[in-house]
Amino acid sequence: MRRGPFRVGDRVQLTDSRGRMHTIALEAGKQFHTHRGHIKHDDLIGMPDGTVITHSSGAEYLALRPLLSDYVLSMPRGAQVVYPKDAGQIVTMADIFPGARVVEAGVGSGALSLSLLRAVGDGGQLFSFERREDFAEIARANARIFFGEDHPAWTVTVGDLVEALPQTVQPGSIDRVVLDMLAPWECLDAVGEALAPGGVLICYVATATQLSRVAETARDKGGWTEPQAWESMVRDWHLEGLSVRPEHRMHGHTGFLITTRKLAPGTTAPLRRTRPAPGAYGEDYTPPNDEVWTAEDLGERQISDKRVRRTARGLAAQVERDDRIPDEDGPGAAD
Ligand SMILES: C[S@@+](CC[C@H](N)C(=O)[O-])C[C@H]1O[C@@H](n2cnc3c(N)ncnc32)[C@H](O)[C@@H]1O
C-alpha cells in the first residue's frame, strides 16, 4: 500500500525541522509522544503522503511514507546490512530481473533480501539461506513489516548454503546467485551446480583478501568467466545557496563486489588476452586452500547474542501489533 492517502496500518516517517526522524505505524485513536507533546494518528489518517502535521507544541513535522532505503537504514539489525548504494549495484550488475529465480545467502537482517524481492517481483522466486535461525527470524519480521505481509516470492531456509542448496533447488535451475558471507569461495561448487549456464554470481565482501580468494578460487576451479571486481563510493553534496560542494564526511568503505558467470558444462573460457602481471603468482602467492577464516580474522564487529535476542523480541512484538491493526480496505486491496 504505497499510494494514496495515509491509511490505518501504514508506516509513516515524521521528520522535524532539525532532520530528526521517527517512524510510526498508524493506529486509529493512538498518539505519538515526544518529550514536548504529541501528534494524533487520527490527524494523519486520510491525509495525502507528503503532508505537514503540527505537533501539540506547535512544531511542524513532515509526514512521508518511508522509502525502501529509509527503512533499511532504520530497521532492527542482527547482522550488518548491505547499504542501499551497494544493493542498487547488486540488483543492476547481477541483472536481477522480474520473474528471475534467485538464490541469496546469508540473509542476515534481510536488508538485501528486500531489494531482491522488489526486483524479482511477485512472479519471481528468491531462495534465501541463513545459518542462524535467530537472524532468519529477524529478517522475516523486517520483511513482513516492510511489505505488510509475507512476500509470495520468498522462501527462507535455515541452514548452511552448501548443504541446504542442493536439497532446495534443481541443478541448473537458478538464474542469479547473490552471496554476502564470510567465505563465499567455499560455496562455488554448490552454486555452480545450481546456476543455469550463463547465470550470474555476485559476491559482496568486506575485505580485499576475501575478494582475491573468490577470484582465484573461481579461476582455479574453472567453469566460470573471468571475474570482474569493483567498489562504489558515494559522496553526498551540500546544497545551500552558493555553498554547493561535497559533504565533508562520507562513508569511506562498505564492501567490494565481484561478479562472474557460469559457463556451459565442459566449456573452458578462452585464454585471457592480458597475461597476469609478472610476480602476480610469484613466491609470495598462496593458492586457495582449506584455511579456516573467522570474522575476527577479518576485523568484523560481532553482535552479542543478548542484543540479537532483544532485537528479535522487539520485532516479534511489532509484527504482532501490526497484525492486530485491522486493514481498512480489507483483503485483496490494491497496492
Ligand atoms: C553480513 S550478513 C548478511 C547481511 C544481509 N545481506 C543484509 O543485507 O542484511 C552475513 C550472513 O551470512 C550468514 N552465513 C555465513 N555463511 C553462511 C553459509 N555458508 N550459509 C548460510 N548463511 C551463511 C551469517 O550467519 C550472516 O548472517
Image (spheres, helix red, strand yellow):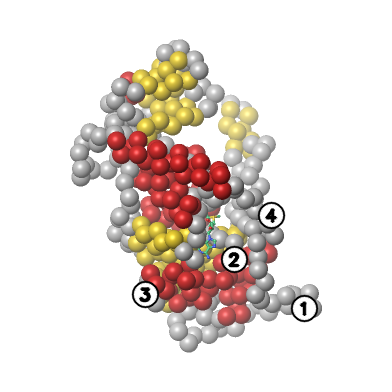
Q: Does ligand 1 reach within 8 Å of label 2's beta carbon?
A: yes
For residue 299, the mark is: 4
- Residue shown at the point (44%, 27%) measured from the top left: 14
Amino acid on which disc 2 is placed: Ala
Which sits in the foreground, 56 or 5? 56
- Across and down, in percent, residue 102 comes to 40, 64
Q: Which residue is mark 2?
A: 183
Name the N-terminal-most of marks 4 and 2.
2
- Residue shown at the point (50%, 57%) measured from the top left: 132
Name the N-terminal-most of marks 1 and 3.
3
Amino acid on which disc 4 is placed: Gly
Q: Which residue is mark 3?
A: 170
Decide if residue 183 is on the left or right side of residue 94.
Answer: right
Name the N-terminal-most of marks 1 and 4.
1
For residue 150, the mark is: none
Which sits in the foreground, 130 or 206? 130
Disc 4 crowd, CA 10 A, few/some/many (<14, 14-19, 20+): few
Tags 4 and 2 touching, CB below 8 Å: no
Nearer mark to the viewer, of 1 and 4: 4
Q: Considering the numbered disc 1 on the image, is that residue within a helix, a strand or a loop?
A: loop
Q: Which residue is mark 1?
A: 282
Q: Quadrant of residue 324?
A: top left
Q: Considering the numbered disc 2 on the image, is that residue within a helix, a strand or a loop?
A: loop
Name the N-terminal-most of marks 3 and 2.
3
